[in-house]
Amino acid sequence: IFFYRLFWSFYDYLGTLTIVGLVSTLVLYGLLFPLVMQQPLASTQHSAIVGIALILCILAWVTITWSALACVARSMIAGQPIPLRDLPKRAWRSSLKAFPYVIAVGGAKLLIAANVVFYAHLARTYSGGVGLLCFSLSIFFIYVFFCYVAYAMALIGSWVANMKSSLLSNAKSALIALIVIPRLWISAFVFGSLSTLLLLISILGSIYVLSLWVVLSATAFQLAQEYIANLKVATTELGEGHSVRQYRRKAVILCLENEYKKPRRTLRELLKPWEY
């Protein structure tokens, strides 16, 4: 179900995602251009000013780009078209609410990655028990980093689904979605990582990297919410006294039944789109 929905979501909104990705990439190159063209003999003060301005501009770029992609993903999940002329206005309105999520997701990842690098450096510096301890801590923070990436995906998906809710409320919803069905998020993370690698290798596909993760997160969160709702139905239908596995199996069956009740889309639509 997950990959089926993800594929058709990208297919239906490919034009919009391409325009958003292309425009955001060109803007990013424009922001990085002053840094690349900066004279190597420039003063330290000038370099610091350029660096601070560049960081602020990139933060603004990430916030507005994520806001635009979140608006597209929200319309995508709802199955509603989104006119391109309305997208800049919607992205600007939601950018202020998006900024805390950018800090929560990006800042935490940078902090965890800094711990990985710090303890890895100490492990190379010291030997014996101290070096082994630092190496173990470095491995531990790598594990924490991957876990947080999965949680960040759930948080992004929760934000897309509930833009008007507070950060704390969406953080709780994301945690529940991650705990209840972790395999979904592991699959989404692995698929997203491999797809990102392929997109970056292709160079031109790099314009879809941010789009991929936002749509991936929104689709996974939607499925997680449906699974949680069906888990409650399964608990009511089966009653008490059953194992957790039985409740989960029944919830999966209910998800599949609901999905198959919807009109199915086939490869014929790809081959002959003018007939639809």
Image (spheres, helix red, strand yellow):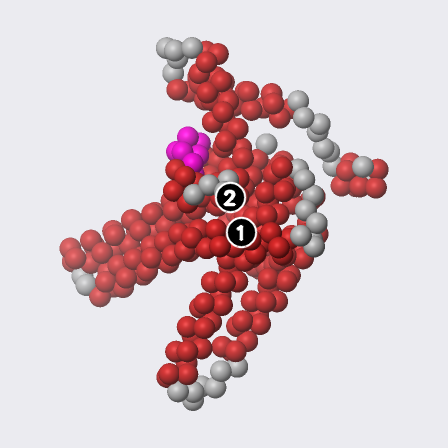
Q: Which residue is mark 2?
A: 163
Q: Nearer the viewer, residue 77 or 198?
A: 77
Residue 58 at least partly seen? yes
Which quarter of the image is occupied by the N terminus? Answer: top right
Q: Secondary structure at mark 2?
A: loop
Residue 99, percent from left and from top: 46, 55
Which quarter of the image is occupied by the C terminus? Answer: top right
Q: Secondary structure at mark 1?
A: helix
Q: Which residue does the image show at 48% across and 17% down from the upper left?
A: 234
Q: Which residue is mark 1?
A: 94
Q: Please state if 78 lies on the left or on the right of 108 as rendered.
A: right
Residue 211, percent from left and from top: 58, 51
Tell me which label, 2 or 1, sits earlier in the chain. Answer: 1
- Residue 219 sits above or below residue 240 on the image: below
Which residue range is magenta in the image? 173-181
Whether 50 is among the magenta residues is: no
The type of residue carrying mark 2 is Met
Residue 20, percent from left and from top: 63, 57
Which of the 4 image quadrants contains residue 119?
bottom left
**Whole-number angstrom distance, CA of label 2 to CA of label 1:** 8 Å
Q: Are marks 2 and 1 in contact (CB under 8 Å)?
A: yes
